[in-house]
Image (spheres, rainbow, N blue to C red):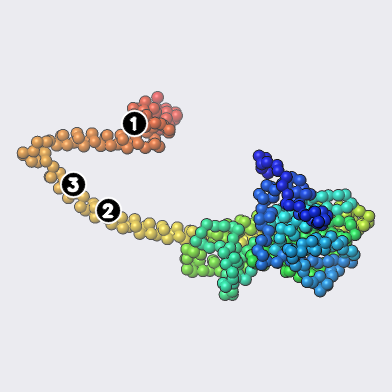
Amino acid sequence: MNLEEDIILETELGPSPRQSVEQWKWRGYPQSLFGNWVANRVTRSKMVENCSREPREKCRIYYVDVLESGDLKSAKDTDPPIEVDESALSQLWDQLQIEPTGLRLRLLLIDNMKHPVLQMLGTRYNIEPCFFTSSLNWIPSRYQEEVVKKKGDHITVTLLFVRTVSWDKSAAPSQNKHVSCCDKAIDTQESLRVRSVRSPAEKYLLQDLLALHMIRSSDPGGSTIISYHPSAQWNRTTAERLKNLVHKVGESVYWQKIFEQSKDPTFFFLAILWYALYAWDEALDHLYTHMNWLETNELSTNDNHLTTELHIIQAQLLHYASLLEDFRKSVTFVRNTPSPVLESSKFTDHARRDTNKLMRKECHNLLSEIDRLGLQLKNITDLARATVNFVDSRRMQDLTIATVRDSAAMKQISYLTMIFLPASFVAAVFGMNVREITDDATETLTHYAVVSIAFTVVTAWLVVAFQSHSSFHEPGSGFLRRLAWPFSCVIRPTSLRRSLRSQPGGLP
């Protein structure tokens, strides 16, 4: 929140006098329902900016109806999806106002969310804008709101998970540009290309989004789940795919028994979360296979690009661990947030206890599977770390061998120098222009020794003075103080003298 912003209540242009205020009231969302969501805040949240703006992308609303008995309506009864016509938005608004009857739950799945559709859904179901901001910005979140005892509430779960997708070299640039490359900085948000030792087919792991908002209500119209799906061009899970998966859940004998045992629609919410778990399971299996491929090729080829890829995978694995932890927290949130409808007259005490017990059991099953995935991810992380350490140790061994080889060469050069050094010294001495060697010379050997010793002392003095860190002067000393280091060494006891003084019977 920007506390310095000017609180100006800006809204979109209202309808013309001919239009019904009730029909177009959704135009003012979110400020019409949540006064603190002014225009500036909406802009900074990118809630409108991240909506689909491509005219060729049609916004479609798929829906699944669950009867009071727990059975799902046939897919033929809910086809075709609602295709949003932006020139006839009033018809969509009228369609959303129709209260369903005889339903336990209605699931709305939105592809290519348009801004008017966002406003209609938010107004119709009184949805907190945080759901749309977290979904459109891919921010993991989980929270409960609008809690009314015995009436209902709203729960939101937005989580990121990893999914396996087939590698298509002829895919659009929008698909492949997110694949990790060794030629640039590591970005954990990018997709990861994986290969296999068993199959030449290549796949890649990409981050997908599961954004669910559930309105649990005791009204005759039943509860509602709203699912947001990103644009299809990013190759993420589409609304149509999730709809088909939900119908497969309805055909499952296991889940059908659960839906018959309890009328709590939260079990459908929980069943959708299993989709993320199956995606995680498949992705980690391919990642482990890819690690085996990398290990085999790295040990046999010693390719630098493969080593870089190992470091990229290590960074990705740390990110995957945080996503898996968010998944665990989301399931725990669902388990610890029972529906207020359970306290209503629709549920007897016995039914309420059975529902809570069944919910804890199913959440425990899902959490145990997440723990299994966490252990599998840890094993892959340990394998990647061990492979990197082995490769690094082998390279250090190669460097050591190269250093020993260079040392041998330098030793040979030293031997040659030692052979010629005496002759060079004798030639330098006999070439000196001093009286002891040359009769007509003007200087003596004594003058040479004095001047050489003086220049050696001055050079050593300046070298120590220009060193900011030395044992001859205190740390942090200025240049002038360092220049006087011979005197300070005489005055200040050295570390050797201090150690001798500290010993019994040492220096006085």
Of residue 107 and residue 446, the one placed in the foreground of this image is 107
Three-letter amino acid code at the position of disc 2? Ser
Label 3 sits on residue: 425
Q: In this view, does 254 lie above or below 16?
A: below
> Disc number at residue 483?
1
Q: What element carries label 2?
A: helix
* Percent position of residue 303, x then y: 47, 65
Q: In which quarter of the image is the N terminus?
A: top right
Q: Which residue is drawn at 81% across and 74% down?
A: 76
Quadrant in which residue 268 is drawn: bottom right
Disc nearer the start of the sequence (1/3): 3
Q: Which of marks 1 and 3 is in front?
A: 1
Residue under the point 84% across and 60% down: 97
- Looking at the image, which residue sits at the far front? 18
- Identity, as a three-letter code, of the amino acid under mark 3: Phe
Q: What element carries label 3?
A: helix
Identify which residue, 340 or 281, lies in the foreground: 340
- The residue at the far top in this view is 508
Q: Where is residue 166 in the image (x, y as percent from the top left)?
A: 62, 71
Image position of 161 (left or right of 15) = left
Which amino acid lies under the numbered mark 1 shown in the image of this protein?
A: Leu
Find residue 424 and report its horizontal and vertical position in percent.
18, 49
| Residue 373 numbered mark, or none | none
Say which residue label 2 marks.
Answer: 414
